[in-house]
Amino acid sequence: MELSARNQVKGTIREIKIGSVMAKVRVEIPGENVINSMITIDSVEELNLKVGDEVFAVIKSTDVMIAK
Amino acid sequence: MELSARNQVKGTIREIKIGSVMAKVRVEIPGENVINSMITIDSVEELNLKVGDEVFAVIKSTDVMIAK
Amino acid sequence: MELSARNQVKGTIREIKIGSVMAKVRVEIPGENVINSMITIDSVEELNLKVGDEVFAVIKSTDVMIAK
Amino acid sequence: MELSARNQVKGTIREIKIGSVMAKVRVEIPGENVINSMITIDSVEELNLKVGDEVFAVIKSTDVMIAK
Amino acid sequence: MELSARNQVKGTIREIKIGSVMAKVRVEIPGENVINSMITIDSVEELNLKVGDEVFAVIKSTDVMIAK
Amino acid sequence: MELSARNQVKGTIREIKIGSVMAKVRVEIPGENVINSMITIDSVEELNLKVGDEVFAVIKSTDVMIAK
């Protein structure tokens, strides 16, 4: 299955912080950059996410801003 | 001025496609990754964005999904 | 590859309207409901979307509001 | 009052999980589909949402992706 | 019908620019502030939006960032 | 550094509620209006946000709906 959200950046999970209903997942991507993702704790469990996992940070293009 | 959206990934604009009210801005980031951004043509003009510009792709954490 | 966005509703594409950089994709889902999606024309081409295709409308939970 | 977000899918609340500042609301829609919504606990209180309520899941079209 | 998105700021439409599938709606709010909204041209037509209309700009809390 | 999100409304922080991973920030803007923002607790700490601070509520145009 392919997704219309074409921004898919490969990285490694460096931190997972579980909250009450949301969780923070910190992903390190190339160039010493970091992408933080806030997803539901349900998704963390269902995808069985763990520190060290290779994942993709996926972002819909309409959610990306530009700063200059 | 500092922004709460902490996902700010540095890159270079490789393509700008101007539509009727929206524009596509393609940004190359480290690791041969690409981030596409859909913003208003007003923003493209006001920031005076051009191919070759060094910019930041800025994303709110709640808009980032994880794929595994 | 599995996605953290767990809202994935199966339906059938009933209309595609190609704009200058964005496209509207109208998906009919069960119960005579309709979900409209605005995605880039690049995604329409790369996924080779056509009227009649069986697809999933995918939505991140933080983007869903409730009305009562 | 009418809203520009035209994706409004009727369903029934099957679960509410109250977190510290956010809450998860699980809505069952036709075709045995489920839509999860993450909203503020303030909204849950002000709308007085309860399991069993008939509600609408409301989604802006620019927040809907397509998977094929 | 009440909506979980509690950010509803009253204003007056000062400009509508119709694109190919999206439209820009510029709303003037108190304090000489302006809110721009990008919605589908379908919504502009179905709500029969016109310059001079009193409307509400509606924003989900998870889509609001803070700059300081 | 300038941002493509042109909706930047000045206001004053009236309440901060810290959750487990997310926080609610309530900002009073002109015209007795209120804008609620849900951001990460990391952002609250890194921007050192406090009640009484003058800040901007920043919103991408594609995230603004219209109600009439």
Image (cartoon, coloured by chain):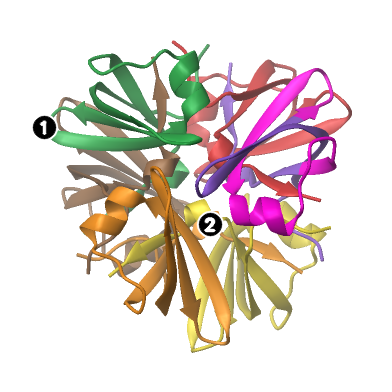
Chain colours: A green, B brown, C red, D purple, E yellow, F orange
The percent position of residue E19, horizontal first and vertical second, equals 59, 57
Q: Chain of mark 2?
A: E
The percent position of residue D51, horizontal first and vertical second, equals 79, 36
Q: For mark 1, what is the residue?
A: A31
Secondary element type, mark 1: loop
The foreground one among C43 and F22 is F22
Q: Which residues are magenta?
A: D28-56
Q: Is residue C59 left or right of residue B66?
A: right
Disc 2 residue type? Ser
Secondary element type, mark 2: helix
The foreground one among C31 and E18 is C31
Neighbor class of circle 1 (other Cα within 10 Å; few <14, some 14-19, many 20+) is: few
Disc 1 residue type? Gly
Measure how far apart labels 2 and 1 are at the Cα level: 32 Å
Is residue B49 among the parts visible in the rendering? yes
Is residue E20 among the parts visible in the rendering? no
Q: Is residue A43 left or right of residue B16?
A: right
Q: For mark 2, what is the residue?
A: E61
Residue F38 lies, with reference to residue A57, above or below; the image says: below
Question: The C terminus of chain B appears in which quarter of the rendering?
Answer: top left
Q: Residue at x 52, y 19 (%)?
A: C47
Q: Residue at x 21, y 36 (%)?
A: A34
User: Total marks drawn?
Assistant: 2
